[in-house]
């Protein structure tokens, strides 16, 4: 059996990113907001940024681990790992500004936050479909 080494490295990276995003929410909440975001748009974007990573990472890691167990440490698996890591990082960067999370004041360099969010979402979609396609391909 192949050991999913690439998936393990990606998982470690995602856990570290998740902790950074979690701390961002926790530090913001320490200012007196204990549940919800109570209309605080900055807290809302931090919660959404943290939650979006959590909702996308688990299933992708599971599918990627199964694929890596079946096919080994191939260039395809490594490429999926790299693209997913970059996509999730770009998405988090996009959500680090109200321009990226809420489309607020999209002028000048602020457009970069919206672009980062979009590229992150696109990279996540591509890797999700790519890993599913590859997993189906191993069974045909």
Image: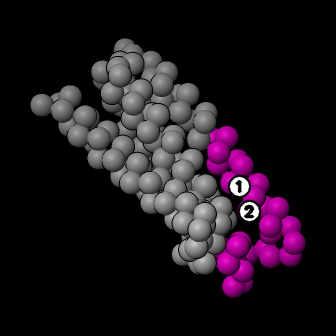
- Residue at point 48%, 47% (across, down): 87
Q: Are marks 2 and 1 in contact (CB under 8 Å)?
A: yes
Q: Residue furthest top?
A: 1
The quarter of the image holding the C terminus is top left
Q: Residue furthest right?
A: 31
37 up-or-down from 121: above or below: below
| Side of 75 where 38 appears, left or right | right
| Side of 38 where 54 appears, left or right | left
Q: Front-most of 62 and 10?
A: 10
Give the structural element (helix, strand or loop) at label 2. Answer: helix
Residue 64 falls in image quadrant: top left
Q: Front-most of 97 and 131?
A: 97
For mark 1, what is the residue? 22
Residue 75 falls in image quadrant: top left
Q: Residues within 10 Å of mark 2 (few under 14, many from 20)?
A: many
For mark 2, what is the residue? 25
92 up-or-down from 100: above or below: above
Q: Kindly tell me whether residue 117 is visible in this rendering.
A: no
- The spot of residue 136 in percent (x, y) is 20, 37
Give the structural element (helix, strand or loop) at label 1. Answer: helix
- Residue at point 33%, 27% (across, down): 76
Q: Main secondary structure of the magenta part?
A: helix
The quarter of the image holding the N terminus is top left
**How far separated are the C-alphas under marks 2 and 1?**
5 Å
| Side of 14 where 128 appears, left or right | left
Q: Which residues are magenta?
A: 15-44
Q: Front-most of 72 and 97?
A: 97
């Amino acid at each position: 059996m192949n050991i999913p080494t690439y998936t393990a490295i990606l998982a470690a990276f995602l856990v570290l990113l998740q902790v950074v995003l979690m701390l961002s929410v926790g530090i913001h909440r320490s200012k007196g907001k204990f549940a919800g975001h109570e209309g605080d748009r900055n807290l809302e974007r931090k919660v959404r940024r943290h939650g979006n990573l959590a909702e996308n990472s688990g299933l992708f890691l599971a599918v990627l681990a199964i694929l890596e167990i079946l096919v080994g440490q191939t260039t395809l698996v490594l490429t999926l790992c790299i693209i997913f890591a970059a996509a999730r990082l770009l998405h988090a960067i996009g959500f680090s500004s109200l321009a990226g999370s809420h489309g607020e004041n999209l002028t000048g360099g602020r457009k970069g936050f919206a672009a980062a969010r979009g590229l992150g979402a696109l990279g996540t979609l591509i890797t999700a479909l790519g890993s599913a396609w590859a997993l189906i391909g191993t069974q045909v």
